[in-house]
Amino acid sequence: MEKDNLKPIYNDTFQKRSKPKKSHRHRNILITLLISLILIGGGSYFWYVHKSSSISSYQVRGAMITQDDGYVDFQQLQDSRIKFVYLKATSGASYKDDQFENNYNRVSGSDVQVGIYHDFSFTTSAKEQYEYIVSQIKKESGTLPIVVHVTYYQGKTPNTDTQGKKLARLLKMLANHYDQDCIVWASPSIQKQMVDPFVTKSKRMLTSDKLHSKRSDVKFIQYVGKDKLRINRKSSNLLPAVFNGNTKEWKSYSK
């Protein structure tokens, strides 16, 4: 009888001691799976962040061009899938970009869409700036909405009430004359201080080091981050910009 009792006790003891080993293996498997999921999730997140901060991830890429860029080969831009350029035309009521007409004529021979932009002046009236723009660009207003660029001189903030109202008047006169929409190009802080309180109808071009915006009125982003445009498979010093939308939406912005 004693021998018969020993056998069940031994088996039961062995089984009880074996269970922790099985549980330990399960725990190791779960930890391994959890670490794998974290690594996969983290990798996917960083891939998404990199992709969203890459100019090449945008379907519609462009550049802001001035006389300081020298000779620009627009056919090369077209071959590099650059969809648009904005040419600097005028500033204030007395300055015209030296390369504006040359650039405008040459880009017109390519499939690259073209727009023009004006540097807003705090020291001249809306009427003076409007008359100067019209006298200099004449009918060469491009196929994209006219852009008015606003930046503070040497970081000094002007009277935002006075200048915001003047900006609104200039935009209205340009839109009526050219029968085109206008866009205000400025940094987020200037948009908030001087543009948003006074300009309600015009869309926005945002200066940013991030290639995304939750604002529905932001149609372009002028990018100032580390990434560069690739022209002819090489990094370019042209000031990059992207259209904040897809190809279908882009078509509504070109004539």
Image (tube, grey):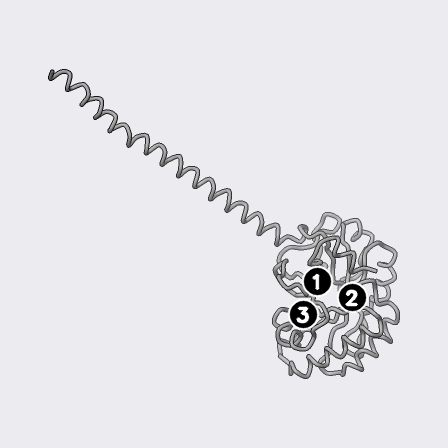
Residue 221 occupies which quadrant of the picture? Answer: bottom right
**Location of residue 34 (image quadrant):** top left
Residue 46 in percent (x, y) is at: 54, 49
Looking at this view, is 1 or 135 the one in front? Answer: 1
Residue under label 1: 219
Task: Tell which residue pokes out farthest to the front in this image.
Answer: 1
Compute the Cα span from label 1 to label 3.
Answer: 12 Å
Front position among marks 3 and 2: 2
Is 175 located above or below residue 235 in the figure? below
Q: Reading the chain from its start, which is encountered first: label 3 or label 2?
A: 2
Q: What element carries label 2?
A: loop
- Residue type at mark 3: give it: Ala
**Residue where numbered disc 2 is placed:** 145
Horizontal side of residue 119 vs 192, given as left or right: right
Give the class, few, some or many, for how many residues have Cα within 10 Å of label 3's Cα (few <14, many ≥20): many
The residue to which callout 3 is attached is 186
Q: In this view, does 62 lie above or below 189?
A: above
Query: Which mark's residue is nearer the viewer, 1 or 3?
Result: 1
Residue positioned 57% across, 47% down in the render: 47
Label total for image: 3
* Image location (x, y in percent) of residue 159: 64, 83
**The residue tagged with tag 3: helix, strand or loop?**
strand
* Residue appearing at x 79%, y 67% in the figure: 116
As measured in the structure, the alpha-carbon distance from the residue carrying label 3 to the one carrying label 2 is 15 Å
Crowd around label 2: few <14 · some 14–19 · many ≥20 (10 Å)? many
In the rendered structure, the answer to whether residue 35 lies left or right of residue 110 reads left
Amino acid beneath label 2: Pro
